[in-house]
Image: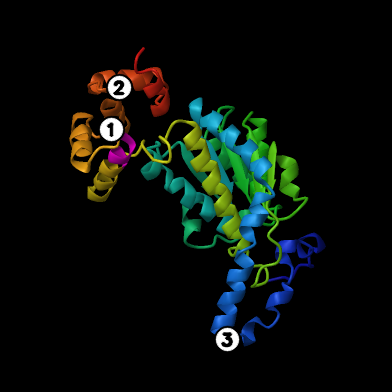
Amino acid sequence: MTSSPVDPALAGLATEGRNPSSQGLDRMTTAELVALMNAEDAGVASAVAQALPQVTAAVDLVARSIHDGGRLVYIGAGTSGRLALLDAAECPPTFSTDPAQVITLLAGGEQAFTQAVEGAEDDTDAAAQDIDAAGVGPLDTVVGLTASGRTPYVVAGLDRARELGAPTVSISCNAGSVVSGHADVAIEVVTGPEVLTGSTRLKAGTAQKMVCNMLTTASMVRNGKTFKDLMVDMRPTNGKLLDRARRIVAAAADVDVATAGAALDRADGSTKVAIVMLLTGRDARGSQALLAASDGVVSAALAGRTG
């Protein structure tokens, strides 16, 4: 294996720097070590807060894509890509979305979720090919994640997505990131040097997951997937979820769990329909009609119940 010269641009990144607080990491007691990690993690939320205007703009793009029949397409490599894949996987059980509505393109393919694929993050040709194979178009929003802000696979993927007319978002953890110049909305969450030098699965990974949480959750809220703070678009597909659905309906309609369960049965398991039935006095068909006329938004359906 031949050695390559140190890349000064990479070495100069904050995420690659040494943290003064952890210089003696290997000599710390366990209690000191975990306390230091906890103290460093405490600053992540504040770093995310600095990027909230950009996160807001990104949520609006994603929400519009979902509303118009498009998708949220994550693209990433290594830890960043794995975190995106995790976020995408949680959308169907939480919001009853089609699994194809929030997807992740991971450098090296699905096998890279559990095992590193040599050189995958540098493969710019593969990024363009993956974007094309996913059928990315103007209705989709493509979100590229790279802690360093310069991962070639992510940059190339965003470039190809923009060529195809898709709105693009970047999420990085360094100020003035390369990738920021390749996205319509650039989210830079500056988390600084890691406790373990260069291990961006730590603070940078936490920051990226926090942003992903907001992108999916907030965009789904904007698309009527909730009523108040309740996830009313879930479908009870097992015993645990059936119990949760009953409790959600009970809380939303201010009824007991038995009444909520009976309404769910009449609503063919639809949490939204059951809630509208109980709050309007209409039957399942009438409640379905109200929801259909209200773009599936429970609060809007209730506002139009006398129409």
Q: Is 249 within the magenta? A: yes
Tell me the SS state at disc 3: loop
Depth order, front residue of 41/115 = 41
Disc with the residue nearer the chain's start (1 vs 2): 1
> In the rendering, which numbered label is found on residue 270?
1
- The residue sitting at 55% across, 48% down in the picture is 212
* CB atoms of marks 1 and 2 within 8 Å: yes
* Type of amino acid under label 2: Gln
User: Splitting the image into 4 quarters, where does residue 204 fall?
Assistant: bottom right
Report the Cα–Cα distance between label 2 and label 3. 60 Å
In this picture, residue 74 sits left or right of residue 165: left
Identity of the residue drawn at 57% across and 46% down: 75
Residue at 25% x, 42% y: name it: 246
The answer to whether residue 287 shows anywhere in this view is yes
Label 3 environment density (alpha carbons within 10 Å; few <14, some 14–19, many ≥20): few
Which label's residue is closer to the chain start, 2 or 3?
3
Q: Amino acid at mark 3?
A: Thr
Q: How far, Cα to Cα, is label 1 from label 2?
A: 10 Å
At horizontal 46% and vertical 36% (from top left) the residue drawn is 101
The x and y percentages for residue 7 are 79, 63
- Seen from the viewer's position, the closer of residues 27 and 114 is 27
Q: Is residue 137 left or right of residue 176?
A: left
Which residue in the protein does label 3 denote?
Answer: 29
Q: Main secondary structure of the magenta part?
A: helix
Disc 1 marks a residue whose amino acid type is: Ser
Where is the N terminus found, in terms of image quarters? bottom right
**Secondary structure under badge 2?**
helix
The local secondary structure at tag 1 comes to loop
Q: Which mark is residue 288?
A: 2
